[in-house]
Image (tube, rainbow, N blue to C red):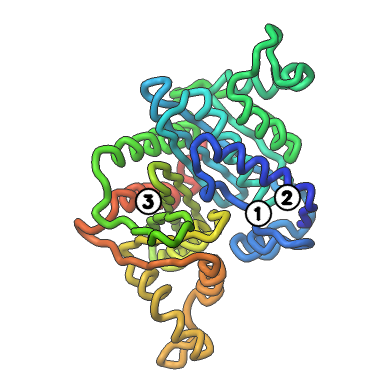
Amino acid sequence: MAISSCDRCHLEESRRAISDRAEETVLIPRTVCSEGSCGMSQSLFGPDTLSDGTPPQENVYTDGGCDPNPGPGGWGAVIRWSDREWTLSGNDPETTNNRMELHAAAAALALLEGLLGRCQVDVHTDSQYLRRGITEWIDGWVSRGWRTRDKQPVKNQDLWRVLHRLTQAHDVTWHWLKGHAGHALNERADQLATEAQRALLRLHRSRRRSRARQPADDDRPVVEICIKASCRSAQGQGGWGGVLRMGEHAKSLSGGESSTTANAMLIRGAAVALRTLTQPCRVTLYSDAKYLIAGASHWVKRWQVGGWQTRDGKPVANQAAWEELLEAARPHHVTWLLAQGDAAPEDLAWASELAAQASKLGEADA
């Protein structure tokens, strides 16, 4: 999948517009495609993902809100593609219900464009403001220079501009769902948004005991990442969850696969989380899994020197995933910390919930 320089400019504009409001400048997904190929889709999702040239068919479920309105808020999105699932969420300490609804849809569409390129997307939302705005009102706003019929500036114009551009980057069909009416994936999006908003409130009540300290002469952003994995059996349905935090702002990511292992999900989650950072950062990555922390900080160096063989002369399990993680970590200064018991950051529990949900891929289909 080739991406032109013009496309890259548009995608960068989308990232900036989404991130400026919530100051999430390093947490919006970036494109990892090179000219003529998409290494991310091939390495993470199999070499035949886009082999026939047909735009992938996606289903996206979004939700957002804040309490009180305006006030601290959260947004969430569930993306279903074939037998795989991605979830993402985020928060903002000062926002509105409508902004969170727009942010959820924009973030999901931006993620799809960055990782897969043009897609056929069915977006499901319980927000009439979002659905009617993008299907009925936006053409008039554009023709009037982003002003209403009363010649007033369009509210939330920054996000509407992003959505307008992203709907041209995909083939999007918009669907309205009644909220809290029992639709499983809509409820999941609502849960993601609620948990993201609660995480913001938890942060104000209690600061982490273990927080990365940034040297005075280092101006790179400081990011904390928590990674968890869950697998239904030794080899079976599994999922990973990740929470990325920069200051007061957090973003969650998760993914699931129908046939995998918990160890593979740990590596996959860490690699995807690191790849979402759009500039070099000082990263502290937490996990309660020794396999990930010891593997990334110590064992992998020995494996590389030994030709990716163990001390017993056997091939290292998950070699391709480890190599992918090394590449994802290369631009950053990463500190790998084993966090267990009272020393574990609060976000690790959030990551655990995301991983458990992701491991149930396919069970909640409506």
Q: Nearer the viewer, mark 3 or mark 1?
A: 1
Q: Nearer the viewer, mark 2 or mark 1?
A: 2
Amino acid at pointer 3: Ala
Q: Earlier in the sequence, mark 3 or mark 2?
A: 2
Q: Which dot marks residue 31?
A: 1
Residue 181 in the image: above or below residue 354: above
Q: Would you name the residue on which mark 2 appears? A: 8
Residue 53 point in image, percent of width and height:
79, 54
Name the outermost residue toward the left. Answer: 342
Q: Which dot marks residue 207?
A: none
Amino acid at pointer 2: Arg
Callout 1: helix, strand or loop? loop
Q: CA distance from mark 2 to mark 1?
A: 8 Å
Q: Are marks 2 and 1 in contact (CB under 8 Å)?
A: yes
* Figure quadrant of residue 240: bottom left
* Figure quadrant of residue 123: top right
Quadrant (top left/top right/bottom left/bottom right) for the N terminus: bottom right
Density class for disc 3 (Cα within 10 Å; few <14, some 14-19, many ≥20) is many
